[in-house]
Image (cartoon, rainbow, N blue to C red):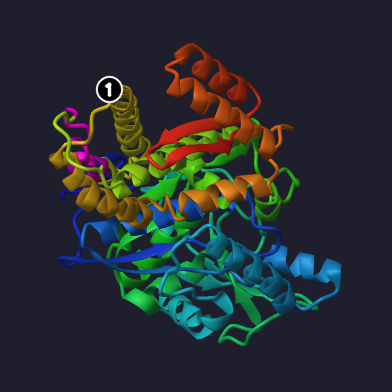
């Protein structure tokens, strides 16, 4: 299937073409581990995950890397504050990140390079840039000559003469130009350092990614992805370094995930305005966050709220109730009867192709989910009518439920990361988080028995009244061939 992405470099959505047929080399920017992993980080990681899954679903062989910036000013400052080595601080937060990847069922790349493991490669890139006069040595380090690279600004659409020194640009009297950025920083007293041809020091932030990409993949890759906040100056600097050194395009396609705010304000570790992953998981099942992110296009900004999380928890519960219901019909063995229902599950035949088509259109997960929710509504309506009619499923439905339904569940698990649990496991998870109302399980079962009697007597008014009463108390029931199921809702 044809894929298209919004390419930040060209500023438009375009057909995706690989450098080598059927293969993709991809690099994604990772975190600087000096604090708790938070929701903002995870949104970018989920975007990487969805991209990887979509490429694999389209039979593309993907080799990808996500780096770890394990030496940085913020790491050094935090380690000094705690009186511990940088490596110890990094190890703590990388372990937390690894736990997040596992809990959220996020795919891991084949390569997770660290800056400290790539110092020789970084020095090689800097040496090449000096030799080509793109870089120079000053009293504080080695810097890149921004104005020498004619295409500087092509990713961010900045014009070089309009750029001013300030918050996003390092100010240093040792630089030839305020726009120049550090490739190598000479070590200050007490700082971690490595030997280099220019003196003891450590890499600048931008050069590390260029060096890792070239070391792992060569001069050019298919996709470079990261958060929107990295477009300038980080990714702009990567292009300048890499293309200055090799004379070849760094990446064909540049993708950027939208920024995450928290109740309208920037989410940031430095201001302590964020939701840590460990705090989120103390209250919500992990799959809820995936649905939050899938419900909004990866490239759009997202204002995270707990009200949004609650709404998506309700949606997730609806999905699992639907799965439980259809699973019940799939496993039910009925004797042949004269009266059979109209074709109920017809849309199941085209469900995967329709959803896949949207995912191939710039990872439009929200539209793909809308297709599934439409299918759920249609089938629920038809199954309710089926139950009241006394008819049975026809042979076409039975065939689709035995073939296409398991295929779909497997597909949505692998391609979108949903339905990773059995329904009963999910609902048990909800009970674990004490998300039900004060009504007890015994009382719920008693109400269900009363409703069962009412339905047997065809007292539909009483049946509906009991259902609505339970719903008002935070309990939703679902009739299935194997009996009435109930679950808590928020």
Q: What is the quadrant of residue 58 in the picture?
A: bottom left
Looking at the image, residue 371 sits to the left or right of residue 82; the answer is left
The magenta region covers: 341-357
Q: Nearer the viewer, residue 28 or 481?
A: 481
x, y percent for residue 158: 43, 42
Would residue 162 be counted in the magenta stretch?
A: no
x, y percent for residue 50: 38, 53
Residue most extreme to the top: 461
x, y percent for residue 304: 59, 36
Q: Residues within 10 Å of mark 1 (few under 14, many from 20)?
A: few
Is residue 382 among the parts visible in the rendering?
yes
Is residue 158 among the parts visible in the rendering?
no
x, y percent for residue 154: 36, 48
Check the image and report above or below for 311 versus 76: above
The residue pinned by badge 1 equals 389
Q: Residue at x 57, y 20 (%)?
A: 466
Check the image and report above or below for 58 versus 40: below
Q: Nearer the viewer, residue 257 or 190?
A: 257
Would residue 352 be counted in the magenta stretch?
A: yes
Q: Nearer the viewer, residue 248 or 403?
A: 403
Could you tell me which quadrant the C terminus lies in?
A: top right
User: Tag 1's secondary structure?
Assistant: helix
Looking at the image, residue 302 sits to the left or right of residue 191; the answer is left
Q: Residue at x 61, y 28 (%)?
A: 447
Q: Nearer the viewer, residue 349 or 462?
A: 462
Q: What is the quadrant of residue 367 in the picture?
A: top left
């Amino acid at each position: 299937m044809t894929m298209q992405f919004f390419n930040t470099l060209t500023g438009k959505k375009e057909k995706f073409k690989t450098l080598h047929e059927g293969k993709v080399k991809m690099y994604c920017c990772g975190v600087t581990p000096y604090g708790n992993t938070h929701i903002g980080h995870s949104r970018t990681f989920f975007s990487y995950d969805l991209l990887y899954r979509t490429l694999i679903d389209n039979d593309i062989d993907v080799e990808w890397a996500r780096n770890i910036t394990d030496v940085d000013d913020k790491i050094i400052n935090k380690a000094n504050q705690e009186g511990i080595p940088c490596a110890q601080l990094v190890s703590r937060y990388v372990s937390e990140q690894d736990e997040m990847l596992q809990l959220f069922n996020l795919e891991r790349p084949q390569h997770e390079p660290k800056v400290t493991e790539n110092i020789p490669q970084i020095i090689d890139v800097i040496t090449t840039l000096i030799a080509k006069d793109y870089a120079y040595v000053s009293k504080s380090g080695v810097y890149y000559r921004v104005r020498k690279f004619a295409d500087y600004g092509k990713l961010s659409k900045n014009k070089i003469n309009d750029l001013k020194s300030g918050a996003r640009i390092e100010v240093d009297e040792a630089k030839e130009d305020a726009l120049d950025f550090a490739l190598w920083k000479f070590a200050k007293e007490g700082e971690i350092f490595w030997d280099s041809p220019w003196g003891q020091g450590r890499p600048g932030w931008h050069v590390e990614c260029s060096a890792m990409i070239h070391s792992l993949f060569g001069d050019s890759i298919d996709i470079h992805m990261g958060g929107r906040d990295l477009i300038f100056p980080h990714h702009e600097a990567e292009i300048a370094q890499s293309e200055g050194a090799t004379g070849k395009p760094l990446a064909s396609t540049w993708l950027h995930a939208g920024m995450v705010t928290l109740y309208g304000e920037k989410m940031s570790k430095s201001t302590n305005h964020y939701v840590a992953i460990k705090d989120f998981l103390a209250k919500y099942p992990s799959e809820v966050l995936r649905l939050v992110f899938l419900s909004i296009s990866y490239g759009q900004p997202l204002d995270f709220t707990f009200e949004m999380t609650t709404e998506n928890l309700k949606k997730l519960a609806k999905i699992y109730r639907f799965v439980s219901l259809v699973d019940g019909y799939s496993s039910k063995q009925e004797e042949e009867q004269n009266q059979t229902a109209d074709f109920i599950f017809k849309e199941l035949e085209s469900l995967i192709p329709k959803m896949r088509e949207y995912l191939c259109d710039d990872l439009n997960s929200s539209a793909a989910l809308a297709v599934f929710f439409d299918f759920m509504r249609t089938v629920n309506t038809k199954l309710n009518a089926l139950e009241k009619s006394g008819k049975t499923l026809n042979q076409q439905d039975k065939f689709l439920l035995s073939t296409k339904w398991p295929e779909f569940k497997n597909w949505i698990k692998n391609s979108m990361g949903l339905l990773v649990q059995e329904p009963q496991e999910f609902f048990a998870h909800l009970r674990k988080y004490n998300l039900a109302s004060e009504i007890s399980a015994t009382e719920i079962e008693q109400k269900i028995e009363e409703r069962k009697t009412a339905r047997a007597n065809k007292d539909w008014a009483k049946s509906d009244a009991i259902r609505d009463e339970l719903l008002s108390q935070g309990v939703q029931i679902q009739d299935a061939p194997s009996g009435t199921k109930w679950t808590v809702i928020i």
